[in-house]
Image (cartoon, helix red, strand yellow):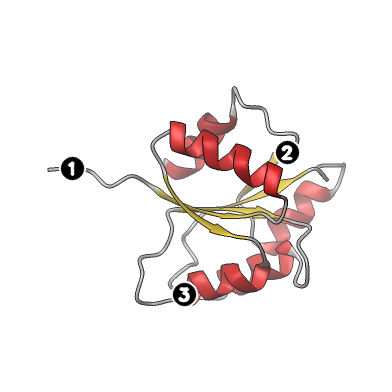
Amino acid sequence: MTIAAPKVLVVEDNDMNMQLVEYLLEEGGYEIVKASSGEEALSITRDSESPAPDIILMDIHLPGMDGLSVVREIKSDERMRGVPILALTAHAMRGDKDRFLEAGCDGYISKPIDVKTFLSSIEQYLRK
């Protein structure tokens, strides 16, 4: 019996960041679903036909709807409530972590991404 790879929804509007995250996740054996806007992420998470992702990586600064608003919307959906969401942001200044957690994020990964610790950070939240 084959165990399914964990499914990661990556919400990122910057092509270079998306390519790096996608490369690292593929190397880690993850299944990747990509969204380049908050609206696209909501469409994916609201699709009851497909299984929910195991974890979501959410860029905070997105065109249109910002990442924290998207997080609040996702967490208001009972089906998605237990899915860990990590803020993926260059804005990890004093007080930002509290804002991320208040919006419903379970943690954050700061940019630039540390390629040595990226996968272990994700694993930490998948095990919770």
Residue 124 higher or lower than 7, as above or below: above
Q: Earlier in the sequence, mark 2 or mark 3?
A: 3
Looking at this rendering, what residue extends furthest in the left direction?
Answer: 1
Looking at this rendering, what residue extends furthest in the right direction?
Answer: 94
Q: How far separated are the C-alphas under marks 2 and 3?
A: 28 Å
Residue 101 higher or lower than 123, as above or below: below
| Residue 47 numbered tag | none
Mark 2 residue element = strand
Q: List the residue tagged with mark 3.
A: 78
Which quadrant: the N terminus? top left
User: Does the image show residue 128?
Assistant: no
Mark 1 residue element = loop
Q: Earlier in the sequence, mark 2 or mark 1?
A: 1
Where in the figure is residue 64, as x and y percent of width and height? 78, 72
Q: List the residue tagged with mark 1.
A: 2
Where in the figure is residue 36, as x and y percent of width and height? 65, 61
Number of numbered discs: 3
Of circles 2 and 3, which is in front? Answer: 2
Q: How far separated are the C-alphas under marks 1 and 3?
A: 28 Å
Amino acid on which the number 3 mark rests in the picture? Glu
Amino acid on which the number 2 mark rests in the picture? Ser
Q: How far separated are the C-alphas under marks 2 and 1?
A: 33 Å
Q: List the residue tagged with mark 2.
A: 110
Of circles 1 and 3, which is in front? Answer: 1
Contact (CB < 8 A) between labels 2 and 1? no
Q: Earlier in the sequence, mark 1 or mark 3?
A: 1
Q: Is residue 92 left or right of residue 11?
A: right
Amino acid on which the number 1 mark rests in the picture? Thr
Residue under the image location 38 percent in, 36 percent down: 29
Q: Residues within 10 Å of mark 2 (few under 14, many from 20)?
A: some
